[in-house]
Image (cartoon, coloured by chain):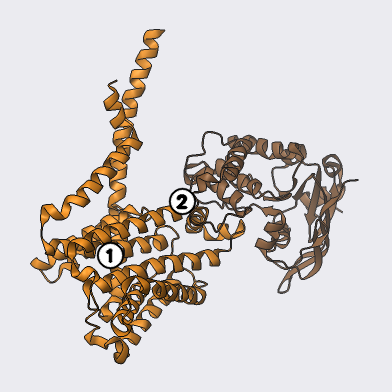
Chain colours: A brown, B orange
Amino acid sequence: MSKTILELKNIKKSFGGLEVLKDVNLKLEQSTFKTIIGPNGAGKTTLFNLISGAYKPTSGRIFFNDVDITGLKPHTITNMGLGRSYQMTNIFPKLTVHENIRIAAQSKGTHNFHIITNYKKLQKYIDIADEIIEKVKLSGKGNMLAVELSHAEQRKLEIGIQLALGGELILLDEPTAGISLEEVPALIDVIESIKNEGEKSILMIEHKINIIMEISDTIAVLHGGVIIADDIPKKIKENIAVQKAYLGGGAQ
Amino acid sequence: MNSRLMFLKNNKNKKKISIILLFFALIVFPFIVNSTYILSLVIEMCIFAIFALSYDLLLGFTGIVSFGHALFFGLGAYTTGILMKGYGWAFVPTLLPVILICVAFGVGIGAVTIRAKDTYFSMLTLAIGQFLWVIVVKSRVITGGEDGYHGVKLLFDNNRLAIYYFMIVVLLLVYIFAKKLINSPTGKVLQAIRENEDRAGMIGYNVLTYKILVILISGSIAGIAGSLYAVTAGSLTPALIHSNTTMHAILMTVIGGMGTLNGPIVGAFIVKTAEHVLSDITQRWMIIFGIIYIIIVLYFPGGITRLKIKSNKFFNKILRNKKNIECFEKSSEEA
């Protein structure tokens, strides 16, 4: 059995009187791809906010690589190797595509406070950026400003920024949200190729069920503040509790 | 194609040639105009160009809008002035305390204000700048108050030609430093902060540290500009610290072009020239400038230097198209 990279233990989160997450237990094995699905308002994004450190859980603990990261600051968690993409595109609009990725790669290095050295002399980061541009299939667009890219390309760029940070675990929050149907396959290609490299563990929130069934190793279903099922895609399809959650809980 | 023509069309060579020409022009300039008045004007331009350049590091490259930048200029001017007249220091040694004081103020002000965002930050810097202005006005014993601080020994015994060359060299050094800074890893982080502060934080940069760093660097440069002002003007007034001086820097930076480094220099030359020309015609010359400012912000937000760059791109496009057509014709002939 491979190592567990992320583990949530009895996570509770309430906002005032509203209990969004009641008791979430979740395990992600290293180098696997898990998707979290669930009806709207199930608390998927809240869960991501807890993992990435934007919120603190009301109770429960989060372990990343067996280290307790509950309540740590977001940038500390990022620096530990847990990167996150957002539902809204979040890039550096008027920097070039290449620079967007290069600056992320640079943040991991030791040259951030060199104020006289020309950045072009630090070939390391430029190489990383070149490599990642290939990986996220933005070749030939390196010199374009990020703002000139299409929405789908910007999502790819964002994944590129994640990769440049070199984290082991990537959280993808609805990567295909707001992208035209024709562009979805290209984006999924990128995600799939990262998955196939086998170096990263990926935790994704997504709604497009066909895609999820195809690329996920496991699927977790979040409903009513708890994980009601966590299994391989085929079993999830057959799971009665999941069908109830999606088709309406009235069918007793 | 003719090789000489090719040489001229190569962009790098073009740049080299124009830089050499500019230098030549700057060297012979004093002998052509041969007027102390115009030389003094150019010297003042250089000082304000340095000041505006330092402001561009904040506004154009980090996206910080400070209304209190003149306080560094004033600090530099008064520190040099008081040390030279009151304590008999020579000019160059005063630059060290000037930089130290500006760094200290930069860190202090940065630490206090930088957590405030956007407009709130700007308002705080305005308040602090004006506060220092009041202190300078009120502490008559040290600064001479509203009457000003007079009799600072002038540089090179007021030999305007020597000062002129000196200023050009200092401006050049500051420009090279700023250019190096913006192309350094740190400078790149600053630009990322300008583009998306939150995201820069998320990818692991401590935004506050970088902002304080740029405030103290640009503050020190502004302080040096102030020192230079002290030893070329000889008298200092509290107006140097007043937010009006900051407004001048904003005007120069925006008119010339934010985030270009050349822009603030061009802007300083334009604003200062216009100031001298227009103030001969009317005392209300600022009104004219207000109108120009509004037009530029509305229609050419990139500033004057970007206009030039754009037209250059346009010509390059034409040239490239021509080249492409030639290449195409050639290849089709070969085929």
Identify residue for label 1. B47
Q: Residue B16: percent from the left, percent from the top?
A: 31, 40
Tell me the residue at 37%/83% (across/down).
Answer: B131
Describe residue A172's horizontal placement relative to residue B12 as left or right: right
Q: Residue A17: percent from the left, percent from the top?
A: 73, 74
Identify residue for label 2. B183
Residue placed farthest to the left in the image?
A: B281
Q: Secondary structure at mark 1?
A: helix
> Looking at the figure, which quarter contains the C terminus of chain A?
bottom right
- Do marks 2 and 1 share a chain? yes
Residue placed farthest to the right in the image?
A: A1
Q: Chain of mark 1?
A: B
Near mark 1 (Cα within 10 A), the count class, few <14, some 14-19 or many ≥20, is many
Choose top left, top right, bottom left or bottom right for residue A70: bottom right
Q: Residue A84: percent from the left, percent from the top?
A: 67, 53
Mark before the other along the chain sequence, 2 or 1: 1
Q: Chain of mark 2?
A: B
Q: Amino acid at mark 2?
A: Asn
Q: Nearer the viewer, residue A217 or A252?
A: A217
Residue placed farthest to the bottom in the image?
A: B141
Whether residue B274 appears in this view of the structure is: no
Q: Residue B211: percent from the left, percent from the top?
A: 50, 65
